[in-house]
Each structure stands twice: as C-alpha cells, then as structure tokens.
C-alpha cells in the first residue's frame, strides 16, 4: 500500500531575520498506488516544499500528509528521494556511493556487494565502479544518485527536478531509463518539474500548481500510459496535451515573475 494523500496542507517558512513566507496554502492531492504523478509549476510555487513534506524532511504543521493511511512523521525507507543537485559524496567512488544506500539495510556484506553490482548495471555504469563523482558527466552523476536511491527498493520514488541540470539529449536518455526502471520494478512516483514536455511525457497525471502561495490549480490526465516511447513526442495528441498544459502554466509563470522578491 503506497497511496499518498495531502489534505489541506499549508506551510509557512519563518526565517529568523526576515518576513515569513506562505509557501503552500491548503493543498489537497491524492496520488494513487503505482501512479506517476508530476508536480508542475513555476519556480518558487512550493513544489520542493510539497515533496519535502512527503519525504519527511520538513514537519507537517497544518493539514495532513499520509502514506498508506499513516501520517508522515519523518523520512523512511518506503520513500526514496532524488535531488536536483545529485547529492553524491565526492570522496566516495560510484560503488561506494551506491553501497552507502545499502549500509542502512542489515544485509550480509556479500549480498550488498551483489546488489551494488546489479544497480551499477541497471543504470548502465558498468566499468565506472571505481570512478569518483568529479570524473563523471552530469548524466552519469544523476544515474549514480538514482541507483543509490533505488538501492533500498523504495515503494515510493520522490524526484525533485532530477534532470534539470542535464542537457536535452542526456535528459531524453534518462527519461527512457527511468521509464524502463519503473516498468521493471513498479513504483509510485512523485516527480517535480517546471518542464511542461517532461511532465506530459513521463506522468500519468500532471498536477499544475499556482504561483506562490502554491495551490493545486488543476489535475490533468495525460492519457499516454501505454504508449510511452520516443515516437510519442512527435504525435499530434502529445502536442495538444503540451499546449493545453502550457495554457494552464503560462499565467502562473507570469505571476511568479512579477512577484519576484
Ligand atoms: N528555507 C526557506 N526559508 C525561507 N523561505 C523559503 C525556504 N525554502 C523555500 N522558501 C520559499 O518558499 C517558496 C516555495 O519554495 P520551493 O518549495 O523551493 O519552490 P519550488 O520548488 O516550486 O521552486 C519560495 O518562495 C521560496 O523562496
Ligand atoms: Mg524546487
């Protein structure tokens, strides 16, 4: 059971030396088991805040966040998170970074090594086991971060603009790899992005957020569940869906720009 529910969730940041910011206002949202949901909205609308509340990295102050009916009270092995900036240990090799994810599990050493090998193959990094992050390209680093998160086989995968720093070609490859991984080991995915095409391509449903304070403006079914693949992006149906979502996000992006502080 991995159904996720946000019920009237608000969140205010209270920095010690500046005015409070209402980042989220009464957000209600359900994510179904094994669904791929994209959170789409302009910069500063509260996407990361929503994801961190679900990850248990921020306390839920107003409203309720539940996973399988239980309130989230902190991070847990059921929810793996991939950050935008990779968050790898620069002094550990690819293998060691992935093993780190496995250390918290009480597995025999040989079993951990076997899992690490499997994960390195899964993200196509065979031969780079002993490389350090500084020796890898952006796409390779992000693959290590994904492998480390997948190491504990979380039922829920949280991704915060994971491919935002990658060039377009690498990003397209990573999209295919992510979809392949999820086909092999189905998961509930909450994927944060400000990229309309990325949201339409990857997600089953796209939750469009309003400019700050973040609210859910509309939830759009993409309807492409069974036909994911590079050919999809060239179809009329795909272009229409992207256009429709652009119409929803455009106004919010303009608002976010003019309200910049
Ligand atoms: N630690 C923090 N302290 C104060 N304000 C914050 C903090 N983190 C985020 N914010 C503010 O909360 C709002 C939402 O932030 P965030 O969730 O990071 O948005 P997004 O991920 O959509 O870009 C933004 O206006 C941001 O400036
Ligand atoms: Mg963010």
Image: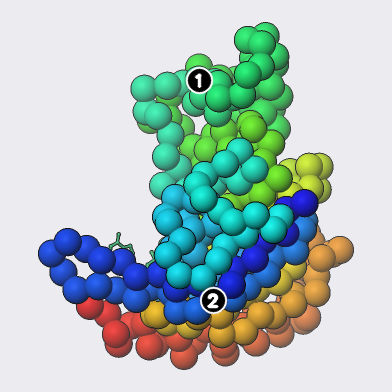
Q: In the rendered structure, which disc, 1 or 2, sits on the residue that comes first in sequence?
A: 2
- Number of callouts in the render? 2
Question: Quick check: marks 1 and 2 in contact, CB under 8 Å?
Answer: no
* Residue linked to disc 1: 96
Nearer to us in this view, 129 or 49: 49
Q: Position of residue 210 (x, y in %)?
A: 48, 83
Q: Position of residue 149 (x, y in %)?
A: 58, 38
* Residue linked to disc 2: 8
Q: Is residue 260 toward the left or the right of residue 217 in the image?
A: left
Q: Quadrant of the C terminus?
A: bottom left
Please tell me which residue is depicted at 19% across the width and 74% down the height of the picture. 19
Please tell me which residue is depicted at 64% across the width and 43% down the height of the picture. 78
Q: Position of residue 225 (x, y in %)?
A: 82, 65
Q: Is residue 93 toward the left or the right of residue 16 in the image?
A: right
Residue 229 to residue 240: above or below: above
* Structure colour scheme: rainbow
SS under mark 2: strand
């Amino acid at each position: 059971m991995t159904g996720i529910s946000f019920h009237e969730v608000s969140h205010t940041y209270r920095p010690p030396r500046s005015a409070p910011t209402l980042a989220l206002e009464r957000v209600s949202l359900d994510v179904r088991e094994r669904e791929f949901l994209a959170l789409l909205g302009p910069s500063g609308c509260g996407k990361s805040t929503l994801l961190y509340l679900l990850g248990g990295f921020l306390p839920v102050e107003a409203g309720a966040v539940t996973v399988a009916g239980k309130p989230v009270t902190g991070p847990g092995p059921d929810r793996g998170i991939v950050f935008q900036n990779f968050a790898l240990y620069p002094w550990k090799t690819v293998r060691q970074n992935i093993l780190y994810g496995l250390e918290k599990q009480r597995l025999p050493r040989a079993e951990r090594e076997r899992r690490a090998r499997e994960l390195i193959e899964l993200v196509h990094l065979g031969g780079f086991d002993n490389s350090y992050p500084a020796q890898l390209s952006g796409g390779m680093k992000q693959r290590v971060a994904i492998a480390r998160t997948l190491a504990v086989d979380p039922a829920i995968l949280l991704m915060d603009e994971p491919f935002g720093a990658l060039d377009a070609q690498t990003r397209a490859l990573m999209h295919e790899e992510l979809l392949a991984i999820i086909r092999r080991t189905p998961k509930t995915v909450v994927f944060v992005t400000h990229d309309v095409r990325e949201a339409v391509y990857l997600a089953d449903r796209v939750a469009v957020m309003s400019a700050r304070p973040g609210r859910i403006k509309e939830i759009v079914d993409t309807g492409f569940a069974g036909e994911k693949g590079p050919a999809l992006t060239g179809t009329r149906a795909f272009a229409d869906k992207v256009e429709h979502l652009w119409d929803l996000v455009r106004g919010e992006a303009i608002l976010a720009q003019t309200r910049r502080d």
